[in-house]
Image: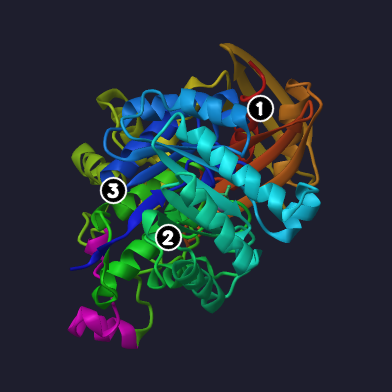
Amino acid sequence: MADKLFIFDTTLRDGEQVPGCQLNSIEKIEVAKALEGLGVDVIEAGFPVSSPGDFKSVIEISKAVTWPTICALTRAVEKDIDLAAEALRYARRKRIHTGIGTSDYHIRYKFNSTREEILRRAVACVKYAKQYVEDVEFYAEDAGRTDNEYLARVVEAVIQAGATVVNIPDTTGYCLPEQYGAKIRFLKEHVNNVDQAVLSTHCHNDLGMATANTIQGVMNGARQVEVTVNGIGERAGNTSLEEVAMIFKSHREAGIETNINSQKIYSISRMVSGLMNMPVQPNKAIVGRNAFAHSSGIHQDGVLKNRESYEIIDPKDVGIDDNAILLTARSGRAALKHRLQVLGVELEQGVLDKVYEEFLKLADRKKDINDDDVLMLAGKDRTAMQRIKLEYLQVTSGVGLKPVASICLNIAGERFEAAASGNGPVDAAIKAIKSIIHRNMTIQEFLIQAIDKGSDDMGKVHMQVEYANNTYYGFAANTDIIAASAEAFLDAINKFVK
Ligand code: KIV
Ligand code: ZN
C-alpha cells in the first residue's frame, strides 16, 4: 500500500510575502476555498503577529474552510504564539507553526546566542504552543545549513516537548538534492523518537533545486511537503505544489500518494496567478502555457499518432481541457461562462454581462481569444469600483514628432482634462495624469509584457509606485500598451488617493 504524503500549502503565507502579491481577505478566502477543493491537508493561512490584516485573514479562513488543518506561523516568542492561538480560535483543525533559526549563521549573527540557548528556546516555544493546541509544528529555520548532529539534538528535544511535525527548511535554497536527502535520512536514523512526529520538507528555489530537494526529502522519509501554487514565494520561490503532486502521480513506483485532485491544478494555478498579478512563465512545468504545446513538426506528428510519444501527462489530468470550445466573436455568453469556470472564476450574471460586452469588443480586434485574455477581461471589472477612472486617452507620436497625450480622468464623477508631451508616448500619458493628480509620487518599476505572441495581442503592465514612503502596485491589461500603462498607473494611484 502507498504511503500518504501530507500536502502543506503555504501560498497564503510564504507565497504572499512576495512584494506586489498581497491579497485582501476576500481574495485569500477565495484561494483557501480553492485549496480545500484541490485537497490540500494543511493551509498555512498567515503570520498573525506580522499585521492586523494577517491576523484577520487567519480568522476568516478558519471560518470559511472545513477540512484542511489551518496553520498559523509564529516566531519562538510567547506574544506571537498567543496571537496565533487567538486567530485560530474558529478553526476546526488547528496547528501552530513555531520555530527558530538553528544554523550557526542564525545563532551567531541573528540571535548573538549559543547552540544551548537556542535549543532551550526551541523546547520552550513548543511547550508554550502546546498549552493552546495539540498539533504543534516546529521549524528549524536554515536547517539546510545546520550541522546535522546539532539538528538531530534539536529535533529530538522538540519532539520530546510535544511537536507533532518537525519542519526542516532549506531556507536559503542552498542544498544539493543528495545533501538534503541525506539530512532527512540522518534524522530518521539518529533521532530516537523520530517516529512520534512527521518530518516535513520546506525548500526554497534559489538554485532551482526546490522540487528536486523536496523529492529527495520524501524518498528519505519526510511525509509532509511545504509547497505553493505555481512555486511562488520569497526570492526565487518555494517548491511548487503542482510539480510534487504530478511527480508522485506519474511515478507510482515511488509508493507515495497525495490527496490532491489533480484535475483542479490548472484552475487554481490561473486563479493564484491572476489574483496575485504574478505571471506564470510560459515554460513552467505542468501549468505553463507551453507545458503541453508541441511546436516542432516531428513532435506534432508523433503526438497525433499517439499522444504518449511525447507526452508523459495527459493535459486533462491537470484540468487542461484541450478540446475546449474556441472562443471567437461568434461565441455566446455560455461559452464564455464555461471557459471562466474552467479557469476557476465564477461571475454573477450582471458582471458576466459586462465582461461579455468587453469580450465581444476584444474578439473584434483579435482573432484568438486565449485564457489570459479572458482572465484579464474578468479582472477588468474591478476597475469599475475605482474612484479615478480613465475616460479617454489620445496620443500622437511618430518619427520626427514630439509625443503628446491628451487625457480625461473622471474623479468621483467630475471630469478633468489635461495634455502633456514626453520622451515617448507612455511618458506623455504619465505626465498628463500627473498634471491632474498633484502628488509627489515616483514610478520605481515598470514592466510591460505581451500575453501571447501576435501584434494584436493584449499587453500587461505591472507598475510599482512610491508615495509618502509607501509602495503601491498597479496592474492593467489592454491591447493598447499605452492605455495599459496609464491604467496601471491609475490602478496604483487609486490605492492611495481615497
Ligand atoms: O523558509 C523558511 O525557513 C520559512 C520558515 C519560517 C518556515 O519559511
Ligand atoms: Zn520559507
> What amino acid type should be assigned to the residue bearing mark 3?
Leu
What residue sits right under mark 2 in the picture?
Answer: 194
Q: Is 316 on the left or on the right of 490, as rendered?
A: left
Q: Nearer the viewer, residue 468 or 18?
A: 18
For label 1, count other residues whose C-alpha is less than 10 Å away and answer few (under 14), some (14-19) or many (20+).
many
Q: Quadrant of residue 376?
A: top left
The residue shown at (54%, 46%) is 14
Horizontal and vertical percent for residue 151? 59, 61
The disc at residue 19 is none
Q: Secondary structure at mark 2?
A: helix
Horizontal and vertical percent for residue 35? 34, 44
The residue shown at (58%, 27%) is 390
Q: State whether residue 160 is above or below residue 67.
A: below
Q: Is 492 on the left or on the right of 401, as rendered?
A: left
What residue sits right under mark 3 in the picture?
Answer: 38
What residue sits right under mark 1 in the picture?
Answer: 493
Magenta stretch, main secondary structure class: helix
Spatial separation of the CA atoms under disc 1 and disc 2: 53 Å
Give the residues in magenta: 298-319
Q: Quadrant of residue 82?
A: top right
| Quadrant of the image containing the N terminus | bottom left
Instruction: Name the N-terminal-most of marks 3 and 2.
Output: 3
Q: Nearer the viewer, residue 470 or 3?
A: 3
> What amino acid type should be assigned to the residue bearing mark 2?
Val
